[in-house]
Amino acid sequence: MQSLAFSTATPPDAVLAKFEVCHTQDLEEARRWGERIFCENRLRNQDRQASVDTRIYYRRLGGIGVGRMSYGSDITIDPGVLDTFALIQMPIRGEEVIEFGSRQVCSTPTQASVINAHLPCRIHHRKDTEKLIMRVDRSLLERICQQHLGRTLQKPVEFLPAMPLDTAEGQRWMRMVGWIYDNLSNDEGSLPPLLAAQFEQALVTALLTCQPSNYSAELCADEGQSIAPSFVKRVERYIEEYAHEPISIVEMAEHVGVSSRSLFAGFRRFRNTSPMLYLKEVRLRRVHEELQQSSAGSTTVTAVAFRWGFSHLGHFTTDYKRRFGESPSDTLAR
């Protein structure tokens, strides 16, 4: 059964036909390709009498990856936690059951599934199932969410795992998916950076607006009701400019001419955080950016952390990993 919501010039079962990366009857080879594209995983064939016939079509574009894949048998996929990306799965036919702890989502041609970047899962792929997939880097997702909100995020973006495709939002999402699949299926050359960035922005914006998440209320709020007072924005700019220096609440309040109490109240109401937590988030982001731009031989994690005011390395490492999905030493080694 084909999803009624998916409509493109390219038939769904011909999507990315020019970009086949794997066709194998070997389960271990299929696992290695899954690891190459996604992450470490374990595959188990639940029907030992049936042969595996894995096909993967995949194309990477900046912070997103699009694909079409099938296994040809009843397969259980155990990827653990997708630390660095979110995964949207849209069956063309058949179904998958995705376990999130004690919860389950049945992914079908009329209901896609969203696997968040920080929650453990297990996927039960049924025989004769074929699916379209969208891989979205966690860093891209959070960067665009931050752009729309006009502030840094205090928690990872977390979507509801079930995505009905027979709703207005679901159909809007699938029109966007169809547009992107059409373009990437038929254009074999490398895309200009500006066009690639447009695809990234459009896809992630559609995901953030079409699929409910822990930031939906704020993203969809009436702008007139959610505009923060000017002093909140001025303090944010102050923090961005002087994050490398010791900053106190008193200094922030004096800079904008309000009381410390008003400053706390403004951040709590309009940013759902405190000024000092905002400062900490900005400093974590600066550490991340500096580690990305440095080499392991030119500096150390300790030196960069101390430079941005993190004196307790244990707490810093925990906060960094929670925020970016990897340890600071992994970022530096990349």
Image: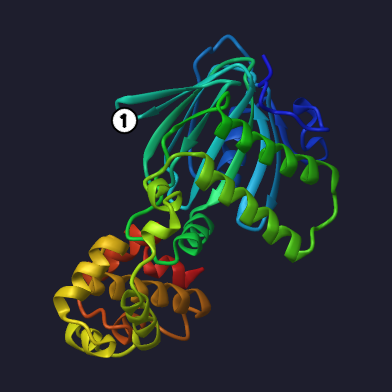
Where's residue 151, x and y in %? 40, 67
Where's residue 51, x and y in %? 64, 16
Residue under the point 27% across and 89% down: 255
What residue type is disc 1 on?
Gly
Residue under the point 54% across and 44% down: 207
Q: Quadrant of residue 191?
A: bottom right
Where's residue 161, x and y in %? 43, 33
Q: Quadrant of residue 282?
A: bottom left
238 is higher (above) or lower (below) than 155: below
Please tell me which residue lies in front, 39 or 159.
159
Q: What is the basis of the colouring in this image?
A: rainbow
Please tell me which residue lies in front, 215 or 116.
215
Say whether residue 241 is left or right of residue 44.
left
Where's residue 227, x and y in %? 39, 64
178 is higher (above) or lower (below) than 140: above
Say whether residue 258 is left or right of residue 40.
left
Q: Quadrant of residue 239?
A: bottom left
Q: Residue furthest left?
A: 261
Count of numbered circles on the image:
1
Residue under the point 25% across and 89% down: 246
Residue under the point 32% across and 87% down: 307
Say whether residue 18 is left or right of residue 63.
right
Please tell me which residue lies in front, 83 or 171.
171
Q: Residue furthest top?
A: 49
Q: Quadrant of the N terminus?
A: top right
Mark 1 residue element: loop
Say whether residue 173 is left or right of residue 253.
right
Q: Where is mark 1, residue-wise?
A: 101
Q: Residues within 10 Å of mark 1 (few under 14, many from 20)?
A: few
174 is higher (above) or lower (below) than 231: above
